[in-house]
Image (cartoon, rainbow, N blue to C red):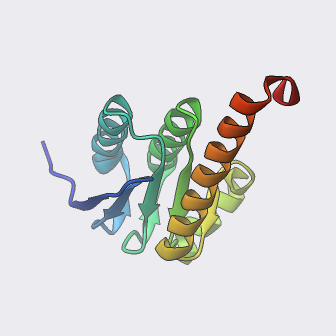
Amino acid sequence: MSNMRFETNVEETHTAIKLLEDKLDARISALLKGEFIALNAAGTRNIILNLEQVKYADSSGLSAILTANRLCSTAGGALVLSNLSSHVEKLIKISQLNTVLNILPTEEEAREAVYMMELENEITAAGAEEDPETFK
């Protein structure tokens, strides 16, 4: 069984994962899915996936990303991809997943986007508590 190299940074609004692999393929994707499922089970709603070092991805890699996207959105959060290489970006566009996935150029922008989403959720929840009729 091979290991997957990655860094995890848990913050208040999200967990950031930086994949330290040059390929996101069948060898890695099952391990990555497992990591996403564990984070989701632990209550993580928002994941930022930094793919800066990934130069190649295949369909199993995209499948792992889609799993994370589904887990996050079901939990009321979001998956945000950042720092995509040109190959990975092309693969996502060819697969037409750029319409489904949240993609931002940098991890910093992804962090800000997640923060804003969480703020909007809090404001909406607070508004619904104050005036339940408005949010029906």
- In the image, 23: left or right of 46? left
**For residue 89, which quarter of the picture?**
bottom right
Q: How many marks?
A: 0
Where is residue 69? Give x, y as percent.
55, 42
The residue closer to the viewer here, 112 or 120, is: 120
Q: Which residue is drawn at 29% across and 34% down?
A: 38
* Relative height, residue 118 to residue 107 (above, below): above
Q: Which residue is drawn at 56% across and 47% down?
A: 78
Residue placed furthest toward the left: 1
Q: Which residue is drawn at 73% across and 52% down?
A: 96
Q: Residue at x 57, y 29 (%)?
A: 74
- Which of the image's four quarters has the C terminus? top right
Where is residue 122? Give x, y as percent.
61, 44
The residue closer to the viewer here, 74 or 13, is: 13
- In the image, 60: left or right of 88? left
The residue closer to the viewer here, 7 or 96, is: 7
- In the image, 92: left or right of 33? right
The residue closer to the viewer here, 96 or 49, is: 49
**For residue 55, which quarter of the picture?**
bottom left
- Which of the image's four quarters has the N terminus? top left
Where is residue 82? Give x, y as percent.
51, 68
Where is residue 97? Give x, y as percent.
68, 51
Residue placed furthest toward the front: 130
